[in-house]
Amino acid sequence: MTDKTPTDIRISVETRYLPEQSSPEQDHYAFAYQITIENHGPETAQLLNRHWIITDAEGCVQEVQGPGVVGEQPVLQPGQRFRYSSGSVLPTPVGSMHGSYEWVTADGESFESPIPAFRLAVATVFH
């Protein structure tokens, strides 16, 4: 990995609580999130791996690592974007996620782009 980012990858997130897939009485809270990844840099890059850190309201941390996202390792040329949806289940009605994506440029240079922290929360819960 290198400290410099050879391309400008921007990541945005939208979240929502899924009451129909949740069972609060069993401490089971389901959330969906939609990630938009945009390549604002001058180089083509391929997303190789993901690393998520998921924290619930009690401070319990779960890490998820693996190849690609939703079964894909998208290649983004300058100006392109990739959007996908996924989800997470927490034992509490509030939590957060953050992490990083590992990329490689067309010339073989590896770099990471941070995934900014975002909140998972049932709309009626304030924390």
Image (cartoon, rainbow, N blue to C red):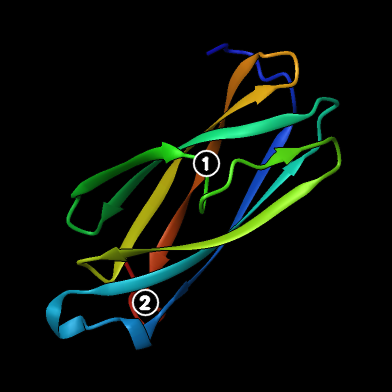
Residue located 75% across and 39% down the image? 76
How crowded is the residue under tag 2: few (<14 C-alpha within 10 Å), some, or many (20+)?
some
Tell which residue pokes out farthest to the front in this image: 71
Residue located 17% across and 56% down the image? 58
Tell which residue pokes out farthest to the left in this image: 26
Q: Position of residue 14 (x, y in %)?
A: 57, 64
**Which residue occupies the foreground of this view, 104 or 29?**
104
Of the 4 image quadrants, the one containing the C terminus is bottom left
Q: Is residue 7 above or below residue 116?
A: above
Label of residue 68 in the image: 1
Q: Position of residue 49 (x, y in %)?
A: 49, 34
- How far apart marks 2 and 1 lie (CA) works out to 28 Å
Residue located 23% across and 45% down the image? 61
Label of residue 96 in the image: none
Q: Amino acid at mark 2?
A: Val
Choose the circle earlier in sequence order: 2 or 1.
1
SS type, badge 1:
loop
- Give the number of the mark in front: 2 or 1: 1
Q: Position of residue 34 (x, y in %)?
A: 57, 62
How crowded is the residue under tag 1: few (<14 C-alpha within 10 Å), some, or many (20+)?
some
Q: Quadrant of residue 95?
A: bottom left
SS type, badge 2:
loop
Residue occupied by mark 2: 122
Q: Is residue 63 left or right of residue 2?
A: left
Q: Is residue 125 above or below residue 36?
A: below
